[in-house]
Amino acid sequence: MGKTFAEKVLAKKSGEVEVVPGQIVIVKPDHLLTHDNSAAVVGKIQADLKEFGVARPEMPVIILDHVVPAASEKTATNHQTSRAFAKKYDIRNFFDVGHGICHQVLVEKGLARPGSIIVGSDSHTCSYGALGVFSSGIDRTEAAALMLRGETWLKVPETIKITLTGKLKPGVSAKDIVLTIIGDIRADGASYKAVEFHGDIQNLTVEQRLTISNMGIEMGGKVAVFPVDDQTKAFLLSYGVNENEYEPVWADDDAEYIQELNYDMGAIEPVVALPHTVDNVKKVTEAGEIEFNQFLLGTCTNGRTSDLEAAAAILDGKQVAAGKRLIVLPASKKIYEEALEKGIIIRLSRAGAMLLPPGCGPCLGAHQGVLAPGEKCLSTANRNFKGRMGCKEAEIYLSSAETLAASAIYGKLTDPRKEVA
Amino acid sequence: MTVWKYDKSDINTDMLFPGKYTYTCSTPDEIRPHLLEDLDPEFTKKVQEGDILFVGKNFGCGSSREQPVLGLRSVGVQAIVGKSFARIFYRAAINQGLLLVECPEAVDAYEEGDEVTFDAAAGKITVGGKEFSFPKLPPAILAIRDAGGLLPYTREALRKK
């Protein structure tokens, strides 16, 4: 019997000949990601660090992104603690405030390599599945233990196979695919399970795959992975990673799955996740009239150049509706510069957008773009939980960059297909 | 002992501990005032050592923040009995030594005032006289809980080296 992606990676990385779902294996992750929570992570092990040191200084990747630039003395001190830790323990992969969102920066720095294992104290660590990485979120305590010991346990998951066929129609995006799937299988549909994407993957760019893998956790998934193809290889090469620097792993044709689902990408329509759960998904055409106060374009889900370009193309020559706020955060400094050079930023700004520095910003409600009671925000982020953007009496809706841009023009939920025709 | 029942699906980490506090509160004393703030503001005022939670499907979904687990542990919650738990939350509970019991039948059976007893080693729970069993954790995972959580477990392992 063939093996799934998860079974093959975990066997290889644990030194077992073969593993089966449910089995617990010990692995040394290639990388451990922490962000602003690095301060809390190292705070748990101050004395231990003196006794044991950092097990594998090449493993941690620290990227400060959640509250940047610092919003308070407390958050500034978190950054200061993280910097001092990185310096003292020779953490070579330390990226200070200003580089951008961890999930984008880690990819840009060539650290997400096919066939590797990455764990991170951030739930959207599953993003790197787009590049054939076994990557998953853990808590801060586990990150602390990993700093000391360099290894951890993982349970071999069962796997769901999702086959995507055909091609997206204009105005429809990868975000619509993943929201549609989450709406169908619900927030716990892939709980404890790996999700593999098969089919006409060549019809999705690597950036689109990153959007889909990023939201694997919103269906409860442990990992959400794509096969490595020529587009992946070219993408990695563009960040300086050569083909001889990684070993892709993919499922056997006769692997065993717990569930199989099929989606025709050509039949996917623009959708929106309504408050207060990501699986509360409706077609834009069936969601009714919803007026918004704020629009948030960015985040680790949809803050890449292609998203900014898609929004700019719709907003060109138009204006954000009077009295409405459009906030844009490029996902990284590199993307910000690319968007500046390509003239995307000026187009967004002229349409009425307000630019924020690369980072997580309003997505988690810690600072910047916090909502007031009774307000509604349409966001390209990955979560619309109650209180997420800093106010529990506000409502968050999730959509693609295209739907967001079209809606910003009219101030209310709008089908982007009308605007791209 | 009080039983707190929140039998609702997908109670997420923002309801258990809002994201806006994630980078300013990390010790039990800082977490406690905001514990379950957007789910049940009364909880943190009234919870007592030894209390139990009965919860719905996919409890703890969302963020990887561990403050909900740290907070529930620090106020002395004895165990959480749930229909199911989100993966990262489940892992965080093991790492803090907090007992999670996956037993949907027990959640459905519980009615206000029912007496509840546990036998974690035997994998048994009784609710109002009815007995239910739940799967025991694998020994490798139980060892983490028995050591008092992942950090004490890791220290022991490193010192044995």
Image (cartoon, coloured by chain):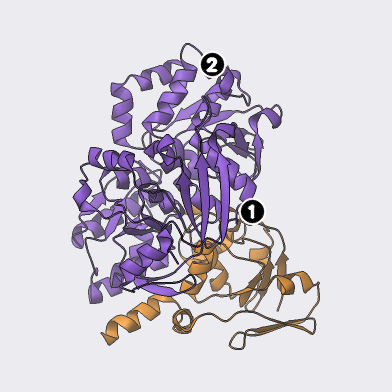
Chain colours: A purple, B orange
- The residue at 81%/72% (across/down) is B111
Q: In the image, which disc is placed on residue A293?
A: none
- The residue at 29%/74% (across/down) is A48
- Asked whether the viewer can see residue A247, the reply is yes
Q: Which chain's residue wears label 1?
A: B
Which of the 4 image quarters holds residue B57?
A: bottom right
Three-letter code for the amino acid on which mark 2 is drawn:
Ala
- Say what secondary structure mark 2 lies in: loop
- The residue at 31%/21% (across/down) is A342
**CB within 8 Å, label 2 to label 1:** no
Three-letter code for the amino acid on which mark 1 is drawn:
Asp
Q: Nearer the viewer, residue A29 or A255?
A: A255
Q: Residues within 10 Å of mark 1 (few under 14, many from 20)?
A: some
Q: Seen in the image, is A245 located left or right of residue A129?
A: left
Q: Nearer the viewer, residue B42 or B92?
A: B92
Q: Are dots 2 and 1 on a single chain?
A: no
> In this figure, what is the number of numbered marks?
2
Which residue is disc 1 drawn over? B38
Q: Seen in the image, is A42 located left or right of residue B66?
A: left
> Eyeballing the image, is A159 above or below A420?
below
How far is mark 2 from mark 1, CA to CA?
43 Å
Which residue is disc 2 drawn over? A421
Q: Which chain's residue wears label 2?
A: A
- The image shows residue A74 at horizontal and vertical percentages of 39, 52
Query: Hey, which residue is sitting farthest top in the picture?
Result: A317
> Eyeballing the image, is B160 above or below A349?
below
- Say what secondary structure mark 1 lies in: loop
> Eyeballing the image, is A354 above or below A369?
above
